Image (cartoon, rainbow, N blue to C red):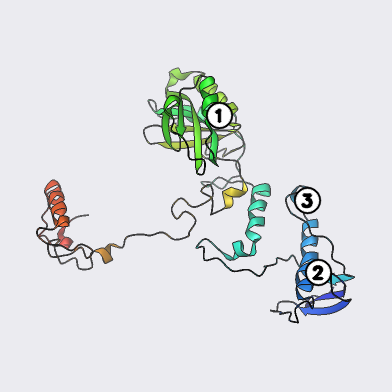
Amino acid sequence: MPQDRIVVHGAREHNLKNIDVDIPRDKLVVITGLSGSGKSTLAFDTIFAEGQRRYVESLSAYARQFLGQMEKPDVDYIDGLSPAISIDQKGVTRNPRSTVGTVTEIYDYLRLLFARTGIPHCPLCGRPVSSQTVSQMVDSIMALPEGTRFMVLAPVVRGRKGEYKHVFEDARKAGYVRVRLDGRVYPLEEVPDLDKNKAHDIEIVVDRLVSGPELGNRVADSLETALKLSGDIVLVNLVDTNEDRVYSERYSCPVHPEVSLEQVEPRSFSFNSPHGACPDCTGLGTTLEIDPDLVIPNRHLSIEEGAIAAWPMTRDGYYMGIVESVARHYGFSTSQPVESLDE
């Protein structure tokens, strides 16, 4: 098998007439010709189609069901092929989230690969995470400091568009009185109408508890109820800090029980989805931050002298009035050089 070239023999796909061609590997090769001469047929429908078909056939039957497989092209044989991707001729968008992976569409394959065959690991210790039992969830919750207020929530809708009136009606009929909608708790009688074109998070408040030895089996009962409502995930919201702890019957670290991961899905690896995007940069890869040296380029000046470059300071100006009020409250003078003030 040649290692330095791709050998195509007897290509007859579409309008190709029994073509033989050798294409050097590790080179930028351009196929030119008149319109209708078979350039795209040779590149996409013959060489790429065979490379993609061989690659998909090498995967397991489970993985193949998620990938579309191309038909075998009409060709005698092709040697020297590697797994291939094709980039169709199209205008590249100026979306700041676009990358080589998204433009070539290999990113879709990677997200699917990670979601279906990937093994989640604990971000603290690197160990593979495993499923949690209800008793393990209870042990983690009972380890909270005594007197900690928390809510047991059943996430029934996660990042989905719709009005979900039936969800609230079913919760009322089941005897629940509160629901958390997009991070805010409402009585079920006061839930606002939802915008059907926006994604929403809806969690039913199963129980509100205070940690302590007298809880007994109530935590376990509440967890089991929440798991039945949501399927396999339960949220425990620490009321005082508004921290959500995710407990799952599927993925949890055996050493750090406070680390629990949701079911891995393709959207978990998408920076265009709020479920996979970085919470700081929202998937853009950059963040906007204030540079103190640009805001105050000369720290020898006082605020009255215009140390804050963006503010047009005058004695009777709007900004100056605000700053003087703040200065009186915190006990400093606007006539002091900025370098003499503490943080």
Residue wearing tag 2: 46
Inspect the image, locate mark 2, and give the three-letter code of the amino acid beneath it: Thr
Residue 303: which quarter of the image? bottom left
Q: Secondary structure at mark 2?
A: helix
Mark 2 or 3 closer to N-term? 2
Vertical side of 24 occupied by 111: above or below: above
User: Is 283 left or right of 70, judged from the image as shown?
Assistant: left
Q: CA distance from mark 1 to mark 3?
A: 40 Å
Mark 2 or 1 closer to N-term? 2
Inspect the image, locate mark 1, and give the three-letter code of the amino acid beneath it: His
Residue 208 in picture, x, y percent from top left? 44, 24
Q: CA distance from mark 2 to mark 1?
A: 52 Å
Looking at the rendered image, the quarter that the N terminus falls into is: bottom right
Residue wearing tag 3: 60
User: Is 11 left or right of 182, judged from the image as shown?
Assistant: right
Say if residue 258 shows up in the picture.
no
Mark 2 or 1: in front is: 1
Vertical side of 333 occupied by 250: above or below: above
- Label 2 close to label 1 by CB (< 8 Å): no
Vertical side of 22 occupied by 98: above or below: above
Mark 1 Cα shell of 10 Å, populated few (<14), some (14-19), many (≥20)? few
Task: Point out the residue furthest to the bottom here.
Answer: 33
Q: Which mark is residue 166?
A: 1
Q: Residue at x 10, y 55 (%)?
A: 333
Q: Residue at x 27, y 66 (%)?
A: 294
Inspect the image, locate mark 3, and give the three-letter code of the amino acid beneath it: Ser
Residue 243 in picture, x, y percent from top left? 42, 37
Q: Secondary structure at mark 3?
A: loop
Residue 143 in picture, x, y percent from top left? 46, 29
